[in-house]
């Protein structure tokens, strides 16, 4: 694990609160949130948020591993256009066709080119990885992003539209 913070180089934004009944800050991800190759189920965790700015019009939810041995990290999940009145997602909302995301929410293809949450799968010998689960408060009811774009394109748009962000970081290693 490195000290690299993928949000440190971005504009500083106010923080709000992100909690989960499935994962804990700075703790190893449980089996359901890991990839099947590590005994997991590719189940996105339950997430709930509060304390965001009152002018929030929508949310984006992402999961990013900055410690992947790629030079550019690894996106596990990216969802946007979550309506402002939605302040939680159930466990499994990131599964393709789960029906648990609110109408209008868009899931972008992750690094595997799957439009779903893909669980933690740090390669053997690469140490402990950090998984940044982030909810971004957005100043627009929807972002006009092509549904086949990458999560990096979402990040670019969030640079101009995010009002605040809430971060919960969990960990995983191949030998956990």
Image (cartoon, rainbow, N blue to C red):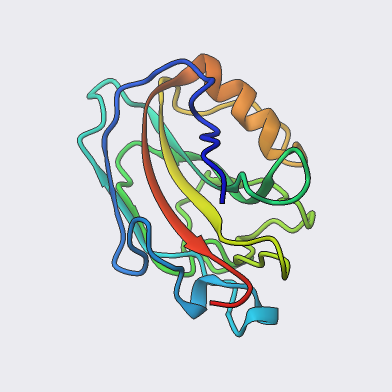
Q: For this rendering, which residue is in front, 148 or 133?
A: 133
The image quadrant of residue 150 is top right
The image quadrant of residue 4 is top right
In the orientation shown, which residue stands out farthest toward the bottom? Answer: 39
Give the image location of residue 78, x and y in percent.
59, 46
Left or right: 14 with respect to 99? left
Residue located at (44% from left, 27% from top):
141
Residue located at (22% from left, 24% from top):
54
Judge whether 25 appears above or below 92 on screen: above
Give the image location of residue 102, x and y in percent.
45, 52
Left or right: 173 with respect to 113? left
Left or right: 100 with respect to 173? left
Judge whether 2 appears above or below 24 on screen: above
Number of disc labels: 0
Residue located at (78% from left, 46% from top):
70
Give the image location of residue 134, x and y in percent.
44, 43
Judge whether 57 appears above or below 106 on screen: above
Q: For this rendering, which residue is in front, 22 or 68?
A: 68
Q: For this rendering, which residue is in front, 85 or 52?
A: 52
């Amino acid at each position: 694990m490195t000290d690299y913070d993928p949000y440190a180089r971005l504009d500083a934004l106010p923080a709000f609160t992100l909690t989960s009944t499935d994962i804990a800050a700075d703790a190893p991800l449980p089996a359901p949130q890991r990839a099947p190759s590590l005994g997991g189920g590719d189940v996105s965790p339950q997430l709930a948020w509060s304390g965001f700015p009152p002018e929030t019009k929508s949310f984006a939810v992402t999961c990013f591993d900055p410690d992947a041995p790629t030079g550019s990290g690894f996106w596990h999940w990216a969802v946007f256009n979550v309506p402002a009145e939605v302040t939680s997602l159930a466990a499994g909302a990131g599964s393709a066709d789960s029906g648990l995301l609110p109408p209008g929410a868009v899931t972008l293809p992750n690094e595997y080119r799957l439009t779903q949450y893909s669980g933690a799968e740090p390669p053997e010998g690469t140490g402990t990885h950090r998984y940044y689960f982030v909810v971004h408060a957005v100043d627009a009811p929807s972002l006009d992003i092509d549904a086949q774009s990458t999560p990096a394109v979402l990040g670019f748009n969030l640079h101009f539209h995010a009002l605040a962000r809430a971060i919960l970081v969990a960990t995983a290693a191949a030998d956990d």
